[in-house]
Image: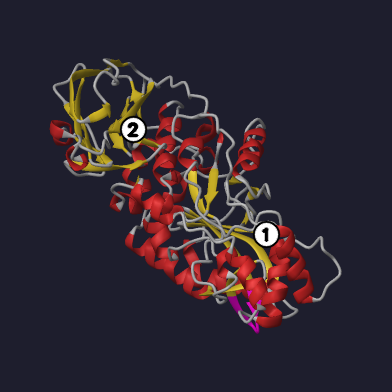
Amino acid sequence: MGQGGTLRIINASNYVLKLSYCHSYQMNSWDGKFPSVINQGEIKDVYIEWDEYIFNTITDDSGNVGYSIVGTDRHFEIQARWRYLQVDWQNTIQDPKFCVQPNTQIANLGWVHDGIVTLTFCAVNDNNLVNISHLPIIEYSVKKDFKNVDNTKIEKELVKYVSIQDKGQPFSNLLAMAEEKGGTKLESNLVGLLKQTIENPEQILEESYSNGDSAYLKNWMETYGPVIENTPLDDLTLACTHNSGTYKMVSPFGSLWTKCQNLSISDQLNKGVRVLDLRVGEDNGNFILVHDKWRSEISLEDTLKQVQGFIAGNPKEVIILDFHSFTALNGQFDENKLYNLVTTSLGNLIYHYNGHVPTLSEIWSTQSRVIVSWSSNNKPTEFFPVIDQKWFDKDNLGDLYSAIQDEMKNSHDNKGLWSICAIITPSISNITPIQSIPELTKWFQAGGEWAKNANIIAVDFVEKTNIVQQAISECLIKSVSKKYHNDVCFALMK
């Protein structure tokens, strides 16, 4: 037994990929697993496993498999190295008809234990669309998600501490009341009970997870523009950070349950995120980003400056700012003042709403690069309607999976921008602090039904998933299988 997972090879082209050779050293699963031929529009999953037998030197496990592009003299090689995969594009990268991404000779694909990494080959011909059949998602086997703690005692102590009679309050409300009353100086028995819920899976996750090359993510829209530029934004698959501005919370205690991101706004955008979920609070006349009533240290003004700075360095990337909620932290919220701050800060970067969802090409024909969606009955005419967030309020993976599965059965065609909140919400029955969900790599893998049907996928701790890479691959698949693209050839790896 050893580190294992799946490589998904998507031939989103009208070329045939033919196996040239396959060999390995100390791999449990490699030889004989790769298909001899990958036909036009086919998606093939290959299970790969390293050998971690105690008497072997595990770090020299390796595998190599070569594919040629039939009808050309081009070829490339997929390589297994210890706990990651990579692709050597060989002479493919030298052909001006092909564009590889990342644009390096040897590109790291990363690795997710028991998950999926994706390699997508794209060769687009204006007169020949690619017929791609998406695969059903891998069924999630419900398992015990979190450690067992006595939540009844925790609820009792919280209710007692904040001196209220209503035991039906949501956990976040009880915690906020406790924070307001005593800050971090809570009674020792309550602190002890809360600490029982804190797990740190990150060491295990880091040992079985590698995100691969990411430098190319900062300008992926420009790179793949010739393929995706005529696809409406609500038909693309885009990665979103849930509660984007919570990477630095004021409360060191409450942040365990309110912090949803580690990366700054700039870093999120550089990692390929193109939708920001902004919750704005007004605090004594100042606008800050919040999670419900929990304050962050991030001002909206600084957030807008980070967006401006990113676009200045990446002038063809398009950002969606979803102003999803407005919270009065001291009794009032001046929406007109907020509007003035946003419009003054972004100016001509704001793309004006004209009744339909645009394509990248339409946006690029203007000076604008930012779509602003606005959660208000008094929405300014130039702003887009608020993004329709599908939030499920589930505190465990099994229930979340079922809720998303039910939502994906609904039609979302021609309904504007919408998002799936693929997040766990702490509750009084399950108050484990917010953490990343590695299972998302299986649920929303490119070439799967959920990725196909999704528009925006909102996640916590985005850097702990490869949801951005999967979303980009799915954007290409959607675009080559519909009459959206121009005449260009691409080879994409994720």
Mark 2 surroundings within 10 Å by alpha-carbon count, few (fewer than 14), some (14 through 19), many (20 or more): few
Q: Is residue 17 visible?
A: yes
Q: What residue type is labelled 1?
A: Ser
Asked whether residue 333 appears in the rendered view, the answer is no
Q: Mark 1 points at which residue?
A: 375
> Is residue 57 found inside the magenta-colored segment of the image?
no
Quarter occupied by the C terminus: top left
Q: Earlier in the sequence, mark 2 or mark 1?
A: 2
Residue 131 percent coordinates (x, y)? 43, 19
Q: In this view, does 101 lie above or below 327?
A: above
- Which of the 4 quarters of the picture holds residue 104? top left
Judging by the rendered image, the residue that carries numbered circle 2 is 1
Q: Nearer the viewer, residue 470 or 252?
A: 252
What residue range appears in magenta?
281-287
Q: Residue 301 carries which label?
A: none
The answer for how far apart the CA atoms under marks 2 and 1 are is 51 Å
Q: Which residue is drawn at 31% across and 45% down?
A: 223
Instruction: Note whether 489 is above or below 109 in the view shown.
Output: above
Q: Give the structural element (helix, strand or loop) at label 1.
A: loop
Q: Which of 416 and 391 is in front in this view?
A: 391
